[in-house]
Image: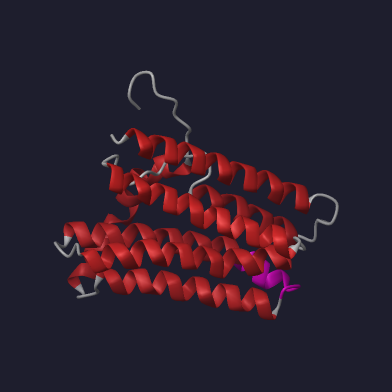
Amino acid sequence: PPAGSFYMASLYDLKPRFQALLRPLSRGLLGAGVAPNAVTLAALALSAAMGAALALWPASAWALAAVPLVLLVRMALNALDGMMAREGGQESKLGLVLNEVGDILADGAIYLPLALALGVHALLAAGFVLLAAASEAAGLAGIATGAGRRYDGPFGKSDRAAALGALAIVAAAGVPLAGWIGWAFAALCALAALTIANRTTKAARGRA
């Protein structure tokens, strides 16, 4: 980060290494004629399917245990679509829109039914999803001000996936959640709010 700036780390900082691991797959998909936008839509469809499974079988340990794997695959698909678009010369405005809107929809599709399955109050669960969406909107605001797309932490997309995946594993293992899950989600909401503040502050400065 620039000198004198206040930087909050995020798992997003590991993205270059993650992309390096995925590069052979990216090249293979491009060689097979797969479009980046198809990968974006696949990530959304996977998220919707996981959310539907959680809504239908909220008490299923298998459904809960599948969440971390689905989130990891979704993160891989999210990284792949951008790589494929850039390296395959297929960047487009439609791709940008699908990527950003798809991320917000995918978050809601998984996290709302997951939170409810974990026993989180409906209002708190909805609040978390709204804050997650707002944090992505705050990131997009940087484009309008010339600061570029903001991915600042401390609670970006990858961080949300790690936190919610961990909670799903805990629940799948049969650990009682009733006494503390609400407080845990309240803390996650606070982190999301801090992320919004951080991103909007950086966006308002109007420089990358």
The magenta span reads: 58-66
Residue 48, percent across and down?
52, 75
Would you say the magenta stretch is mainly helix, strand or loop? helix
Residue 184, percent across and down?
72, 48
In the displayed structure image, the side of residue 197 where residue 124 appears, left or right: right
In the displayed structure image, the side of residue 174 where residue 24 appears, left or right: left
Which of the pair 120/13 is nearer the observer?
Answer: 120
Residue at the extreme bottom of the image, as rendered: 56
Identify the residue at horizontal 80%, vertical 56% (top origin): 175
Residue at the extreme left of the image, as rendered: 89
Residue 112, percent across and down?
63, 66
**Residue 63 painted magenta:** yes
Identify the residue at horizontal 20%, vertical 57% (top origin): 86
110 w.r.t. 130: above or below: below
**Residue 102 painted magenta:** no
Q: Is residue 25 visible?
A: no
Residue 145, percent across and down?
29, 42
21 w.r.t. 120: above or below: above
Identify the residue at horizontal 35%, vertical 27% (top origin): 1
